[in-house]
Amino acid sequence: MIVLAVLTLAAALGVSYWLLMSPFAPSSRRYPYHAPAAEKVVALTFDDGPNEPYTSQILDLLKANDIRATFFHVGQCVERHPEVAVRALDAGHVLGNHSLSHRFGTYLRPRAFEREVERTQHILEGVTGRTPALARTPWLWRQPALLRMLRRRGLHAVAGEFVHALEVFQPSGVRMARRAIAKTRPGSILIFHDGFDSRGGDRTQTVVAVRETIAGLRARGYRFVTVDELLGVPAYQA
């Protein structure tokens, strides 16, 4: 009986992950993780920042390689490092909404999550003068009610593929880059993390992974675009 219960629970968790978190779930049409593309284009995206000094190090890498990327910022992190958000915008990168606190519990209270999204919109507008039209829910959570709420607020939900399932534990950046390069296809949206939730954290190996991924994809003939360019949607609200 215990074994059966464990197997049942595992199956339920697997189905829940597939429906509510996997980038390949049936809901991906409304929460795209890639775009149809005839040419070798890829969008690099970064979640959970700004987080210093790692976001600035990534910005340095992107500048050196003349690449524009998309940063899904956490509101509390923007309040902590407003100058980094401004630097990213001034460099031509696109900023999106990645919630206020990145706390999982807010998903259990839809109105609370809506307030987080609204607050982060105000923070980003106040700091940068621009109001995002792109959003990514933490952990790619895709509960239908949340996606409908984002659409009501004029936000395009954007998913993607995590470059490495264990990035939070900071394995070798070279190993993460190999995984990122191997999974890239024309129209891919790759997800790196320049922070951890809203708390910051060491992202040394992520910086290495970004450098190696850029070099590897360039060698394979890829061109880098922002998410709005890839999907043909606006980056900011009018």
Image (tube, rainbow, N blue to C red):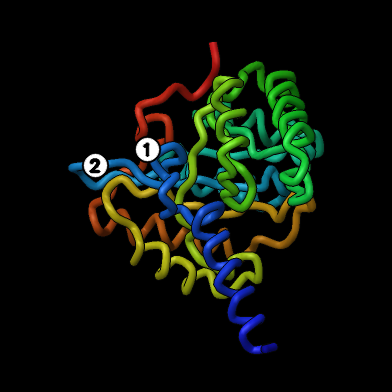
Rendered view: 113 above or below 174: above
> What is the secondary structure assignment of the residue under circle 2?
loop
Q: Nearer the viewer, residue 175 or 19?
A: 19
Where is 171 relative to 97, above or below? Answer: below
Q: How busy is the neighbourhood of tag 1: few (under 14 within 10 Å), some, or many (20 plus)?
A: many
Per the rendering, the mark at residue 212 is: none
Q: In the figure, is residue 218 to the left or right of 105?
A: left
Secondary element at tag 1: strand
Residue at image mark 2: 37
Please state if 225 lies on the left or on the right of 186 as rendered. Answer: right
Looking at the rendered image, the quarter that the N terminus falls into is bottom right
State the CA–CA distance, disc 1 to disc 2: 12 Å
Question: Split into 4 quadrants, where in the image is the C terminus?
Answer: top right
* Residue 3 visible, this orientation: yes
Q: Which residue is mark 1?
A: 225
Examine the rendering and report whether any part of residue 210 can be seen: no
